[in-house]
Image (tube, rainbow, N blue to C red):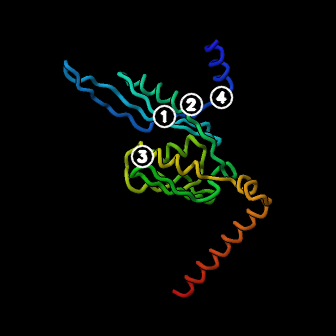
């Protein structure tokens, strides 16, 4: 029964993008010496707005990766994307000492981020974004901070539903704010 349900779920899931973020050799001291194991951190996404991360630990590397991948598939979240290529708005996230800033970017910018952040964005399907990690460079902290930030992203549709107004009003306000910022920036350049 369980095997049939698992096969059904595997058929429904689209092809997933899997990224190995880090692999770490860990040791446990026991009576006879040290027992070595491997801890893996994986990011899994469908390339269309769903992404998850997971950890796994085992005596062999492939088994640790498999456990981490299964964990990531179980913990996937959906992130609303603008035009299926970037975030709707800038967002900050933190976890422990790890802090990240994620900024939406115009078309053609590409992924400007390094290490674990890049793996998350590639698995998520984002094509244009600027990401900056501040503080801890521990992959686990960076991934957790990135997911904390991604959970804060809201689409104009979600905001409109919560406020009880039309989506067009929110988009118009965003465009007006952007043009106002451009005017202020050009005035500052003229003063210099």
Q: What is the spatial separation of the Cα atoms under label 3 and label 1, in whole angstroms?
A: 13 Å
Viewer-nearest of labels 4 and 2? 2
Q: Mark 2 points at which residue?
A: 74
Secondary-structure class at tag 4:
loop
Percent position of residue 2, x then y: 62, 14
Indicate whether 70 appears above or below 88: above
Viewer-nearest of labels 4 and 3? 3
Chain-order first, disc 3 or disc 1: 1
Q: Which is more toward the observer, 164 or 39?
A: 164
Q: What is the spatial separation of the Cα atoms under label 4 and label 2, in whole angstroms?
A: 12 Å
Q: How crowded is mark 4: few (under 14 residues within 10 Å), some or many (20 or more)?
A: few
Chain-order first, disc 2 or disc 1: 1
Indicate whether 181 appears above or below 162: below
Q: Name the residue under label 3.
A: 141
Instruction: Give the residue displayed 43% in from the left and 35% down from the top.
Output: 41
Give the label on residue 13, or none. 4
Chain-order first, disc 2 or disc 3: 2
Percent position of residue 126, x then y: 60, 48
Q: What is the spatial separation of the Cα atoms under label 2 and label 3, in whole angstroms?
A: 20 Å
Q: Residues within 10 Å of mark 1 (few under 14, many from 20)?
A: many
Chain-order first, disc 4 or disc 3: 4
Q: Name the residue under label 1.
A: 54
């Amino acid at each position: 029964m369980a095997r049939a349900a698992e096969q059904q779920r595997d058929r429904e899931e689209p092809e997933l993008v899997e990224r190995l973020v880090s692999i770490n050799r860990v040791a446990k001291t026991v009576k006879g010496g040290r027992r070595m194991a491997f801890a893996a951190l994986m990011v899994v996404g469908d390339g269309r707005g769903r992404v998850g991360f997971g950890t796994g630990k085992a005596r062999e590397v492939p088994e640790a990766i498999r456990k981490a991948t299964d964990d990531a598939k179980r913990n996937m979240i959906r992130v609303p994307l603008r035009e299926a290529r970037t975030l709707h708005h800038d967002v900050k996230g933190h976890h422990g000492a790890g802090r990240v800033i994620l900024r939406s970017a115009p078309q053609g910018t590409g992924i400007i981020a390094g290490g674990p952040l890049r793996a998350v964005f590639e698995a998520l399907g984002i094509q244009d974004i600027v990401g900056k990690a501040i503080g801890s460079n521990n992959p686990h902290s960076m991934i957790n901070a990135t997911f904390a930030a991604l959970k804060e992203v809201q689409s104009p549709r979600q905001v409109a539903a919560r406020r009880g107004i039309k989506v067009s009003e929110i988009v118009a306000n965003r465009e007006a704010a952007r043009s106002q910022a451009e005017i202020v920036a050009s005035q500052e350049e003229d003063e210099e």
